[in-house]
Image (cartoon, rainbow, N blue to C red):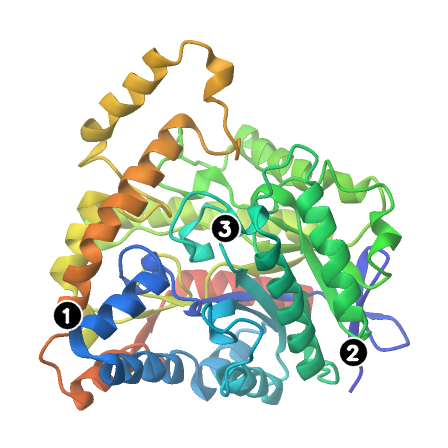
């Protein structure tokens, strides 16, 4: 079995240079749990700590272990392969490998779950990409960095960065001979606030060198700065600086695929032109230099009947238009991509936990409350609470008359985004964590396992239209 590699603008397999186009999905919410994916508030470390306080460490550990066991099994790999898809991007949290209070020491079971899923995928001839979704201290202000703050503390502490380089060296040592691993997505959505992106460039220098000291076989996938959208400060020698087996990762979410889109998507010629222009801007820097591009994340979110009522079908009809139009662009460019997301509780996943499972039933009222309060930042619908936060936004706007002072990093967060991320997605969410954990109270071990088993493939529904569109695209492309 030959390794895959990046050659020029293409991905190839083996020494004969046969082109391969990676078409797949992100396995998010598993080795890095995310609030909108599995229904908790805040960050993963919040719920792990609080659940242990409420039901005890042993029971909490049982639930989380069983959650990992059931979330992705042979049945998931078989279904994924049945669609003609060939690559899964596995999001991981550094906390699975080392402990903050015992840094640079691999946990005894550090690779247990990752080894299991990489092997399951390999058995079905599915490539995997290991994606470091969370770094010590948080590489961005997103909940998905599991940092618990809107500040990007990873870039302010060298020791966080040293640990990151150490961890990637250990991962590369472990997988250096595995041909079914396509490569390493070194950092998900970095947000280095330095004007020249010097922190990120230095980190890529160090990490790529460390990985290559133990593993010369795998593709290195490098996200652009500011959530994989900005390469403008990357060095001119990027094509050779980090070796000749490197791809550059964009994240191509279209605003048309989200509830707060400023216009209803009709797939008009003008809208499709805007969609393509946004995509082309993200990859322009690489195209101008003949470098290899990978779309590590993209995809719309979908309406849910319990929240969107009679509008659900119309919402999803338009979101599927967005999906098809994006795929048409990617097909024309022979672009490799990884749609976000494989599995969740019903917002974006290809498969989703059924409403009649123990988990969905137990947390039904809590999920409705969380939605109404708009505490999750991803694809938020804040109509029920917007009037509460607008005065804060207006107060800041009036108090800071110089508009240039309102432009803080990251620039893609507007004043409204920053206020609501801090006040809702961090502050309000933090106050809801205990309520989430209390819903586990009184459950015995079998009942805790039943909650975790809700995430097993046999207890999930399928987003049929999404999967049909992906399958048809894979068949046309010969993935």
Percent coordinates x, y for residue 181 in the rendering: 67, 77
Q: What is the quadrant of residue 54 in the picture? A: bottom left
- Number of numbered labels in the structure image: 3
Task: Name the foreground residue: 357 vs 176.
Answer: 176
Quadrant housing the N terminus: bottom right
Between label 2 and label 3, give the one nearer the viewer. Answer: 2
Q: Which residue is mark 3?
A: 323
Tell me the residue at 52%/76% (across/down): 97
Relative to 403, is 193 on the left or the right? right
Q: Is residue 156 visible?
A: yes
Q: Is residue 334 visible?
A: no
Percent coordinates x, y for residue 144 in the rendering: 44, 56
Relative to 368, is 243 on the left or the right? right
Relative to 255, is 243 on the left or the right? right
Relative to 365, is 477 on the left or the right? right
Task: Name the foreground residue: 82 vs 204.
Answer: 204
Q: What is the secondary structure assignment of the residue under circle 1?
A: helix
Q: Is residue 193 above or below residue 240?
A: above
* Mark 1 neighbour class, 10 Å CA radius: few under 14, some 14 to 19, many 20 or more: some
* Mark toward the start of the polypeptide (3 vs 1): 3
Tell me the residue at 58%/71% (across/down): 85
Q: What is the secondary structure assignment of the residue under circle 2?
A: loop
Q: CA distance from mark 3 to mark 1?
A: 30 Å
Q: Which residue is mark 1?
A: 361
Q: Which residue is mark 2?
A: 3
Residue at the far right in the pictured view? 16
Tell me the residue at 60%/65% (across/down): 163
* Mark toward the start of the polypeptide (1 vs 2): 2
Tell me the residue at 20%/79% (across/down): 56
Between label 3 and label 1, give the one nearer the viewer. Answer: 1
């Amino acid at each position: 079995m030959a390794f895959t590699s990046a050659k020029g603008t293409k991905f190839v397999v083996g020494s004969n240079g046969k082109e391969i186009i990676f078409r797949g999905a992100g396995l998010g919410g598993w080795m890095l749990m995310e609030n909108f994916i599995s229904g908790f508030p805040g960050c993963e470390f919040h719920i792990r700590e609080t659940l242990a306080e409420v039901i005890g460490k042993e029971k909490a550990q049982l639930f989380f272990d069983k959650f990992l066991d059931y979330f992705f099994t042979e049945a998931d790999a078989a279904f994924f392969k049945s669609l003609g898809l060939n690559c899964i991007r596995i999001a991981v949290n550094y906390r699975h490998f080392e402990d903050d209070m015992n840094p640079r020491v691999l946990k005894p079971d550090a690779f247990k779950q990752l080894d299991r899923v990489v092997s399951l995928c390999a058995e079905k001839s599915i490539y995997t990409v290991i994606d470091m979704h969370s770094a010590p201290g948080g590489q961005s202000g997103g909940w998905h960095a599991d940092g618990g703050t809107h500040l990007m503390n990873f870039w302010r502490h060298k020791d966080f960065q040293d640990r990151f380089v150490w961890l990637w060296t250990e991962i590369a040592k472990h997988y250096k001979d595995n041909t079914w691993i396509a490569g390493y997505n070194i950092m998900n959505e970095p947000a280095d606030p330095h004007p020249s992106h010097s922190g990120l460039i230095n980190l890529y220098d160090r990490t790529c060198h460390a990985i290559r000291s133990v593993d010369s076989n795998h593709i290195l996938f490098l996200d652009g700065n500011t959530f994989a959208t900005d390469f403008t400060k990357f060095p001119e020698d990027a094509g050779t600086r980090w070796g000749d087996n490197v791809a550059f990762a964009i994240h191509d979410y279209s605003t048309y695929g989200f509830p707060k889109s400023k216009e209803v998507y009709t797939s008009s010629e003008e809208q499709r032109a805007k969609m393509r222009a946004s995509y082309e801007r993200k990859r322009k820097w690489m195209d101008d230099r003949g470098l290899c591009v990978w779309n590590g994340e993209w995809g719309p979110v979908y309406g849910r009947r319990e929240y969107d009522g009679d509008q659900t079908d119309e919402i999803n009809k338009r979101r599927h238009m967005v999906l098809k139009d994006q795929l048409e662009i990617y097909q024309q460019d022979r672009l490799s991509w990884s749609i976000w997301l494989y599995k969740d509780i019903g917002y974006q996943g290809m498969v989703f936990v059924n409403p009649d499972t123990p988990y969905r039933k137990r947390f039904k009222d809590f999920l409705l409350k969380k939605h109404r309060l708009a505490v999750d930042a991803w694809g938020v619908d804040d109509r029920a609470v917007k009037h509460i936060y607008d005065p804060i936004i207006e107060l800041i706007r009036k108090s800071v008359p110089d508009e240039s002072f309102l432009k803080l990093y990251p620039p893609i967060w507007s004043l409204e985004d920053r206020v609501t991320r801090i006040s809702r997605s961090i502050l309000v969410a933090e106050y809801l964590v205990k309520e989430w954990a209390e819903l586990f109270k009184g459950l015995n071990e079998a009942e805790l396992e039943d909650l975790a088993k809700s995430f097993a493939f046999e207890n999930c529904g399928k987003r049929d239209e999404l999967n049909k569109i992906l399958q048809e695209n894979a068949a046309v492309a010969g993935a």
